[in-house]
Image: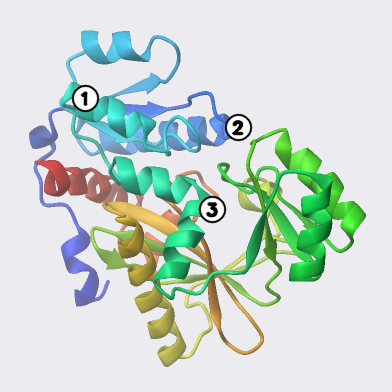
Amino acid sequence: MTAAYAKLFSTVPPADFGRVAVLYGGKSAEREVSLKSGKAVLEALQGGGVDAFGIDVGDDLLQRLLSEKIDRAFIILHGRGGEDGSMQGLLECLGIPYTGSGILASALAMDKLRTKQVWHSLGIPTPRHAVLSSESDCICAAAELGMPLIVKPAHEGSSIGMAKVTTSSELIEAWKAASTYDSQVLVEQWIEGPEFTIATLRGQVLPPIALGTPHTFYDYDAKYLASDTQYRIPCGLDSDKEQELMELTAKACEALGIAGWARADVMQDAQGQFWFLEVNTAPGMTDHSLVPMAARAAGLDFQQLVLAILAASLEARG
């Protein structure tokens, strides 16, 4: 650990957190990942002496929140219903402090289109894109953006529903498939080059991670199941480019109002230009997850990371 990351560690006595509800599971397409993340977070909190218990978020959530004694919530729900501002809004109404970003930042970051619009307005580089609502939109986007392209549901995470395409017919099929996950579908220019992911914690940018996979892109299987995904820390950039990436990440997260913790995904093209793709406000915390890797590079083990995320909720909302 360097001195630069010393302030990330929580100095809050476990008892001061009160009774902590770990919210996980839910009904989104990322439920299975959230179940794994929630289990790991709950075990780390309990192992650290925190009075924590789990809630697999379902139809009885409001009843559970009202009936249980809860001083604080650790949100480890991925995707819609937990990462999009709705859970944050419910907890705000109930007066329950929670981890991570607030309502607006969560909603913005979950919406890939709105995120890109904010970034574009502030000069933060993000790939050119189009919104797809019909086959004619697909044909127009192919002509305007060129090939290859990548298709994305606008409100999903974990690369669910994403596909790389090289022809108009493939684009139409990918749009139809993505539409089964989301009524709003984006298509972006494909950026050829290395991919990086950069975590932020308590206002600091953690060491970037370079990603490598034999898959077409860093898809769901590469993220959570494959054993051949490559992770590099240090990321391989020279010191100037790494500093540029970290400064751009801080700016991109600040633009959305990110708080507590998050993880940004970034591509670099052949000319060395960075392109921001999205920010996850409740990233995965499984054995394949990236934020724990970045935290280890900064000197925090998994339990220390979880406690630091929880401590940030005290700083944000008292």
Q: Which residue is mark 2?
A: 29
Query: In terms of secondary structure, where does tag 2 sit?
Result: loop
Q: Earlier in the sequence, mark 3 or mark 2?
A: 2
Question: Residue flagged by tag 3: what amino acid is it?
Answer: Leu
Circle 2 crowding by C-alpha within 10 Å: few under 14, some 14–19, many from 20: some
Point out which mark residue 113 bears: 3
| Quarter of the view holding residue 89 | top left
Which corner quadrant of the image does residue 262 belong to? Answer: bottom left
Q: Position of residue 160 (x, y in %)?
A: 66, 43
* Image quarter in which the N terminus is found: bottom left
Question: Residue at point 86% right, 45% down?
Answer: 173
The CA distance from mark 3 to mark 2 is 19 Å
Q: Secondary structure at mark 1?
A: helix
The residue closer to the viewer here, 284 or 65, is 65
The disc placed on residue 229 is none
Which label's residue is closer to the chain start, 2 or 1? 2
Q: Earlier in the sequence, mark 3 or mark 1?
A: 1
Locate residue 33 relative to residue 244 in the image: left or right: right
Q: Is residue 318 left or right of residue 288?
A: left
- Judge the density around disc 3: few (<14), some (14-19), many (≥20) Cα neighbours within 10 Å: many
Q: Position of residue 6 (x, y in %)?
A: 18, 67
Viewer can see residue 226 = no
Measured along the vertical axis of the image, is residue 4 above or below residue 74?
A: below
Q: Are marks 3 and 2 in contact (CB under 8 Å)?
A: no
Q: Mark 1 — residue?
A: 93
Q: Amino acid at mark 1?
A: Cys
Depth-wise, is mark 2 or mark 1 nearer the camera? 1
Other-residue count near label 1 (Cα within 10 Å), few / some / many at <14 / 14–19 / ≥20: few
- Give SS at disc 3: helix
